[in-house]
C-alpha cells in the first residue's frame, strides 16, 4: 500500500482551515493508504510555548484527529517527540540544507517578519519536516497550500541525499485539495485563516460552540455587492465563504451560486453557519467523549510503538550511508 504522512502543530486551537485543508483528507486517505499522522510537538516549540499549554494542546490535537474520524486501527497516530529518531534525522537533513534555501521559505519570512530576535529553530523548521516525511518513505503528503514550498524543499533534500549517498528516500508528492487548500481569514480575505491570529473572530476553531460559530460567520467581512459568486481575485471574502460552504454542505460552488441567486449575502451566511455547525457538532461530541475517557494516551503509545521500528531502521540506514560508525 502506498504511504501517507502528515502532521499538525499543537500550537493553538485547530481551525476549520486545518480541517478542510488537511484533516478531511487524512480521513479519506486512511481507507486506501498506509497512514502516519503526527502531532508535531517538536515543531511547535520553534516559537515559545507555555509548558502546560503545550501538553494540553498535544493531547487535544490527537483527540481531534480521532474525533474527526481517523481510526487508530487503520492509521498510526503518534506524537513526534515520542519517536526520538525524528529529532536525529532532522539534524542530518539540517546539515544537507543550504542557508539560501531556508531563507527563501515564505513561512519563515512571515513568522520572523518584524521580530527583533528570531529563534534558530524557526529557521531550520523545514529540515525537521523533511525528516518527518522521508522517515517513512511517504508517497503522498496531504497538506494545505501553505506547506507546498516545504514539500518542494523536502523533495530537493531527498534527491540531494540520494545523489550523494545512494538511492534511499522516496520523493514524496503533495496532496492538496482543489477547493479549500487555503481557507482565508474571516476578517480579511487576503490572509490565511490561522490559529495564531490574535483576533479569534478571524477563525472558526473546531471546538467553537455553535453560537460562537454563528456569531463569527454573521460578522465575517464580505463586500458591497450582493452576488454569491466564486471569484477569488475580485470577491476574496465571499469566495472563501463559498469554499467553506462547499466543504461543509457537500455541494459544488455552482450549486451554491444557483441556490442564492438574487438573494444577497444574508440568507447565504445564515445557512452557511448552520452547515458549519452541523459539520462540527458530531466532531465536538466525539471529542468530549475521547477526552473524558483518557484513551488518547494509549492511542499515542500504541502509535509510537507501531512506527518506531520503521523510524529506527531509516535512521540507521541513513547514518550508515553517511559514514557514521555504527555501534556493533
Ligand atoms: P500547521 O500545523 O500549520 O497546519 C496543519 C495543516 O493544516 C493546513 N492548514 C490550512 N489549510 C487550508 N487553509 C488554511 N487556512 C490552513 N491553515 C493550515 C496546513 O497546510 C497543514 O497541512 N509544517 C506543518 C506541520 C508538519 C508537517 C510535517 C506537515 C510538520 N511535519 C510533515 C506534513 C508533513 C505545519 O505547520 O502545519
Image: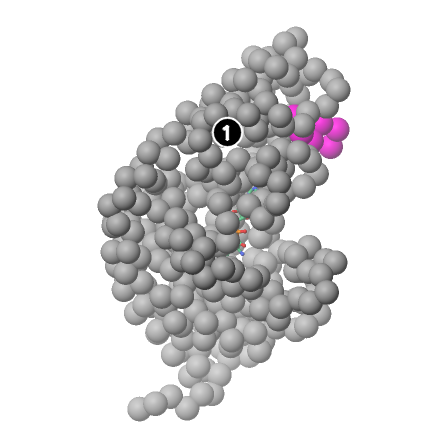
Q: Position of residue 156 (x, y in %)?
A: 59, 66
Q: Nearer the viewer, residue 288 or 142?
A: 288
The one nearer the camera, 21 or 58, is 58
Residue in the picture at 72% in, 65% down: 116
Left or right: 270 as drawn, with respect to 81: right
Query: Which color mode does the image show?
Result: one colour
Image side of residue 301 versus residue 229, left or right: left
Residue, disc 1: 212
The image position of residue 91, as x and y in percent, is 51, 75
Residue sitting at x 32%, y 68% = 308
- Quarter assignment of residue 195: top right
Q: 57 left or right of 285?
A: right
Q: Position of residue 137 (x, y in %)?
A: 42, 63
Residue lying farthest top?
262
Task: Classify residue 102 by image quadrant.
Answer: bottom right
**Neighbour tally class for label 1: few under 14, some 14-19, many 20 plus, Cα within 10 Å:** some
- Is residue 59 highlighted in magenta? no
The residue under the point 56% across, 74% down is 94
Question: 262 or 10: which is nearer to us?
Answer: 10
User: What kind of element bears circle 1?
Assistant: helix
Residue 256 visible from this viewpoint: no
Question: Relative to residue 224, is residue 296 depicted above or below?
Answer: below
- Relative to 180, say whether 112 is above or below: below
Magenta region, residue range: 232-239
- Quadrant of the snapshot with the C terminus: bottom left
> Can residue 272 be seen?
yes
Amino acid at each position: 500500500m502506498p504511504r501517507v504522512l502528515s502532521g499538525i502543530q499543537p500550537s493553538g486551537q485547530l481551525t476549520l482551515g486545518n480541517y478542510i485543508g488537511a484533516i478531511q483528507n487524512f480521513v479519506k486517505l486512511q481507507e486506501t493508504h498506509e497512514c502516519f499522522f503526527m502531532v508535531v510537538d517538536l515543531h511547535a516549540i520553534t516559537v515559545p510555548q507555555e509548558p502546560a499549554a503545550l501538553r494540553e494542546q498535544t493531547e487535544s490535537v490527537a483527540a481531534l484527529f480521532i474525533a474527526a474520524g481517523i481510526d487508530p486501527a487503520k492509521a498510526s497516530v503518534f506524537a513526534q517527540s515520542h519517536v526520538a529518531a525524528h529529532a536525529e534525522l532532522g539534524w542530518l537533513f539540517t546539515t544537507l540544507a543550504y542557508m539560501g534555501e531556508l531563507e527563501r521559505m515564505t513561512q519563515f519570512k512571515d513568522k520572523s517578519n518584524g521580530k527583533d530576535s528570531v529563534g534558530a529553530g524557526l529557521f531550520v523548521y523545514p529540515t525537521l519536516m523533511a525528516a518527518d516525511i522521508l522517515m517513512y518513505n511517504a508517497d503522498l503528503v496531504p497538506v494545505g497550500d501553505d506547506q507546498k514550498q516545504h514539500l518542494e524543499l523536502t523533495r530537493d533534500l531527498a534527491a540531494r541525499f540520494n545523489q550523494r549517498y545512494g538511492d534511499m528516500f522516496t520523493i514524496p508528492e503533495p496532496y492538496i485539495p482543489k477547493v479549500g487548500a487555503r481557507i482565508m481569514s474571516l476578517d480579511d480575505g487576503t490572509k490565511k485563516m490561522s490559529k495564531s491570529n490574535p483576533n479569534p473572530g478571524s477563525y472558526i476553531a473546531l471546538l467553537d460552540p455553535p453560537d460562537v460559530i454563528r456569531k463569527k460567520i454573521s460578522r465575517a467581512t464580505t463586500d458591497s455587492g450582493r452576488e454569491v459568486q466564486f471569484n477569488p481575485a475580485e470577491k476574496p471574502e465571499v469566495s472563501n465563504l463559498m469554499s467553506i460552504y462547499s466543504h461543509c454542505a457537500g455541494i459544488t460552488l455552482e450549486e451554491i451560486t444557483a441556490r442564492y441567486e438574487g438573494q444577497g449575502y444574508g440568507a447565504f451566511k445564515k445557512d452557511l453557519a448552520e452547515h458549519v455547525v452541523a459539520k462540527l457538532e458530531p466532531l465536538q461530541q466525539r471529542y468530549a467523549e475521547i477526552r473524558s475517557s483518557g484513551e488518547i494516551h494509549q492511542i499515542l503509545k500504541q502509535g509510537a510503538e507501531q512506527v518506531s521500528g520503521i523510524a529506527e531502521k531509516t535512521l540507521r540506514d541513513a547514518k550508515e550511508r553517511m559514514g557514521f560508525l555504527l555501534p556493533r
